[in-house]
Image (cartoon, grey):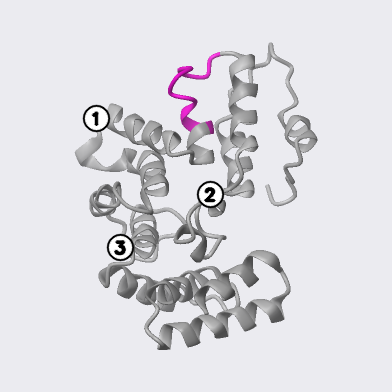
Amino acid sequence: MNDKAIAMLRSTSDVARQRQAFAMLEEAEKAGDLRARANLGLGSLLGVGTPRDPMLGGRLLRSAAEAGDPFAALAVATTLAGGNGSLFLHDSAAACRMLEALFQGPAAPEAQYRYFELCSSDPNLQQSFALLEQACHASAQRRHRVALYACGDPKSGSINSLKKYKAAIDRAIGLKPWQQGSAYEASYMPLFFSDRDEFLVYTIRLLDHNGPAWKFDVQKYLEERGIVLANW
């Protein structure tokens, strides 16, 4: 039931269909599906299929995380670190320890990317930025699209030219989102995690390596490759 609901959410933006999917998640959660509890939390947090209720979303996510769901733990760690709005008291040190615990297992690519993205404020890592870079490269090696762009290809080094910049964009766009991966990854709500087209566009713009001498139109370049920019 959980998988059917998530497949429905992936395929529609119709509010009525999203509500139907949310009701399916509620049925699955009552039957004991821990992934459905995590997805109910994400849906409540984001307002997908139900009115947005961050407090309920936070309780459901923490409950699922404490019961051992890795993607719920990933969502809790992200909010603790200040990403996606802080549901809980901001605690970057606790968040980063939670992310480290996810470095092995199905949530590893996203956990390692978020570690790079969010843990620079962790007082335990302030003098160890190399560890953050290592985490991002590990995520890129696991074929996380945003990490492949943000960190560059570990084989080709940092992005320091227009040629490398274009290559990094093309390399990331050329991969399909991570939900094409394992069935386990595909069973979670697609809107929260960062390896998706909208977040890829956001990251490219945020980390735009363009310089005035290049005279490079990154928006046109992305649009030519089928990336929709309307939300960003």
Q: Nearer the viewer, residue 46 or 195?
A: 195
Amino acid type assigned to the residue bearing label 1 in the image: Ser
SS at mark 1? loop
Image position, residue 117 (x, y; %): 41, 41
What residue occupies the far left of the structure in this picture?
A: 124
The residue identified by callout 2 is 178
Q: Residue at x 48, y 55 (%)?
A: 182
Image position, residue 84 (x, y; %): 47, 57
* Magenta stretch in the rendered image: 149-160
Image position, residue 151 (x, y; %): 46, 29
Residue 48: image tag: none
Left or right: 127 in relation to 12: left
Residue 153 is one of the magenta-drawn residues:
yes
Image position, residue 28 (x, y; %): 46, 83
Label 1–label 3 contact, CB within 8 A: no
Residue 200, relative to residue 4: is it above or below?
above
Location of residue 229 (image quadrant): top right
Label 1 vs label 3, nearer the camera: 1
Amino acid type assigned to the residue bearing label 2 in the image: Trp
Q: CA distance from mark 3 to mark 2?
A: 30 Å
